[in-house]
Image: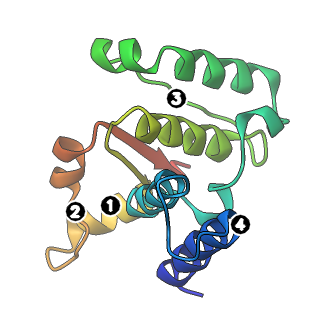
Amino acid sequence: MAVAKKLQMAQQGVVDSCGCKSGCSKCAPEVKFLAAMSDARIPVAYWSLKMSDFSCAENIKRATVDYIKEIRPNYLAGANVCFAGSLGPGKTYSIANILKAAIAHGFSAYYTSLGEMVSGLINPSSKFVVGDLLIGSDFLAIDEVD
């Protein structure tokens, strides 16, 4: 199923659970946040996951929580974070949560993989423009750098 369809279904779920039928001031922020996560290309599987439910390597969780707590000062200082490790310790979960926090604080965010970036660099007809991402995103997450 296409991401646009999943977004539409998630947004409809928010409206349905609100009971307002068309999106009201109560549920509109969540509907807008879902759209922002989709625009940032955060993987759909991570949209509803919360840091409080995050069970992973403790050092990754601590680094993520600490970064998010100080997201605005970290942004202003140009601070970044790099997660490395084998399959499964929570690297993608962490970067998805950092991007979600960035969006919640009014920053622009974008999730991609190194493979997509390389394809964008070597294929001039690609819709994926690396320079636009580097210049136009406050928070850029590059996953799968293996």
Please give left or right for residue 55 compared with residue 22 in the image.
right
* Helix, strand or loop status at disc 3: loop
Instruction: Give the spatial CA distance, label 4 vs label 3.
Output: 37 Å
Residue 56 picture location, percent across and down:
82, 34
Residue assigned mark 2: 121
User: Residue at left 47%, top 54%?
Assistant: 25
* Helix, strand or loop status at disc 1: helix
Q: Are the residues tagged 2 and 1 within 8 Å (C-beta)? A: yes
User: Residue at left 56%, top 70%?
Assistant: 11
Residue assigned mark 1: 118
* Helix, strand or loop status at disc 2: helix
Q: Which amino acid type corresponds to the residue marked 4 in the rendered image?
A: Ser
Pick the front one: 7 or 132: 7
Residue assigned mark 3: 82
Residue 124 picture location, percent across and down:
14, 74
Does label 2 or label 4 sit earlier along the sequence? 4
Front: mark 2 or 4: 4
Residue 39 picture location, percent across and down:
38, 62
Q: Are the residues tagged 2 and 3 within 8 Å (C-beta)? A: no
* Helix, strand or loop status at disc 4: helix
Q: Is residue 6 above or below residue 128?
A: below
Q: Which amino acid type corresponds to the residue marked 1 in the rendered image?
A: Val
